Every structure is written in C-alpha cells, then in structure tokens.
Amino acid sequence: MRKQILSFWMAVLVAWTGIGAAAAGVTDHITVNSYDPQINYMAAMLQALEDGSAYALQVGAIYEQQRNLKIGALQLPQKLTYYFTTYKTAADILAAIEADKRPKYTQDDLTLLAAIMHSEAGCTWIPDWVQLCVGSVVLNRVKSDRFPNTIKEVLDQPGQYRPTSGLYLLHPDARTVENARYLLENGSITPDNVVWQNGIITGSGIYKSYYDRYLGSTTYFCYL
C-alpha cells in the first residue's frame, strides 16, 4: 500500500516538474520548478524516509527540492537543506535531520545558563520546573528579536541580570547543571513569548508563578 502511495506521488511530481517518466527515478536529472504551498514538505520527506527504499528516497529528494523552492519563493524563515544529496541512506538522513533539530551550544553556554539558574532558583527546595522556567526565559530572549542573540549578551544586558563575570564564580550543583543541559539540548519548556521573570507581574500577563514558602516571595514568569 505504501509503495502505491509513493508511486502516486511520484506521478504527481512528474506532472508538476514536467519531466519524462524515463527520468523519474534519477533525481540528478530532475529540475523542480513548482511546489504546492499547502504541502508540508518536511513531513512528506519523513514519510519517504520511513519507507526507506531506494525508490522512496528518490521521491524524498524531489520533496526536498520542492521544499527549498517553497522556502525561497515565500521567503520563509526555515533554512534550505540538502539531506538527500549529502547522505545516501535513510538512516543517515534521519540522523542528520534529528541533529539539526537539537540546539547547538558551547561549554560556555552551559556554564552560564546553569549559573544563572543556580543564582535565581538554586535553593534545594525549589522544584525543577522553576529552574527550567528560569533558563527558558533566557533562551526565549536569545530567540527574540527584542533581545541580544547569545546567552552571554542576554545576561550582560544592563538592569536584567548580574554581570556575566560574576556568574563564572558560581558553582551550580549537579541537578542545576543537568537542568541547564536539558534546556540547551531540547529547547525552552515555555512558550517563546515568555521573556520576563520577576518578583512583580510584568509584560502582558502571567504564564506561571511560584510562591517560595521559605523565603516568602513569589516569582512570576510573564508573557512579552
């Protein structure tokens, strides 16, 4: 059944690109010149990879060309990819796609993110989710065009956090380091527009709040 579905889409793609049936199995000779704006081409690529056959990889390669054409034509924020021309097997292509999904970070990023999470929510009684929200606010700021583009620059912003140099002197415990590593490898646990962490309500409203019964203070995580 899956083979029949792939055959159907290959026929459709041949019609879209205007190539002859004899060339349909050789992506090196295919020039893609159209795309459907309604199709999620990454999902289509993954479906082809799930099949994994040589024929399915040919179909996936055409999907990728159409995805790149769509990104360029509509000026979408996604980056162009060349998985099907760089790698030869479905397993290698899937591994490359998964690797690209994971945020890239340095040891310095880990050191600083763990340090600010320790500084803001390092007490042993504070639950993990609060630490993760603290780190998520930092990562959300890095992603936002309203704040600097690196963790260090975000933490160095005047009036926001302590100077970065002071954070290097802190020694977060293992729990905090692992929470920071989780965020760097998996991304923020909050919506992207949660960019405020404060003792008062700021921005456009509260996403979550935490009342510290030992210190008698409340931390608010708020939307932009």
Image (tube, grey):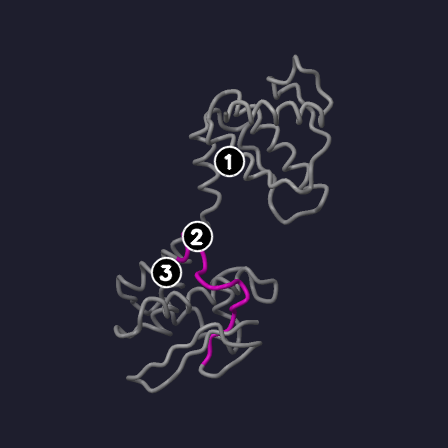
Q: CA distance from mark 3 to mark 1?
A: 30 Å
Instruction: Tell me: 55 left or right of 131.
Output: right
Give the spatial CA distance, label 2 vs label 1. Answer: 26 Å
Q: Residue at x 57, y 33 (%)?
A: 82
- Which amino acid type is shown beneath numbered disc 3? Ala
Magenta residue span: 183-198
- Separation of residues labelled 3 and 2 (CA atoms): 11 Å
Farthest residue to the bottom: give it.
216
Q: Amino acid at mark 1?
A: Leu
Labelled disc at residue 46? 1
Label 2: element kind:
loop
Q: Which residue was labeled with disc 3?
A: 180
- Residue topped by disc 2: 105
Crowding at dot 1, Cα within 10 Å, few <14 / some 14-19 / many 20+, comes out as some
Q: Which mark is residue 196?
A: none
Which residue is drawn at the image coordinates 52% and 23% (left, top)? 3
**Residue 96 horizontal/vertical position (percent):** 46, 36
Between discs 2 and 1, the one toward the N terminus: 1
Q: Mark 2: which amino acid?
A: Tyr
Query: Is residue 11 within the magenta segment?
Result: no
**Which quarter of the image is occupied by the C terminus?**
bottom right
Q: Residues within 10 Å of mark 2 (few under 14, many from 20)?
A: few
Quick one: which residue is furthest to the top in this view? 22
Residue 6's place in the image compared with 107, above or below, is above
Tell which circle, 3 or 1, labels the residue nearer the N-terminal end. 1
The reply to whether callout 3 and callout 1 are in contact (CB within 8 Å) is no
Q: Residues within 10 Å of mark 3 (few under 14, many from 20)?
A: many
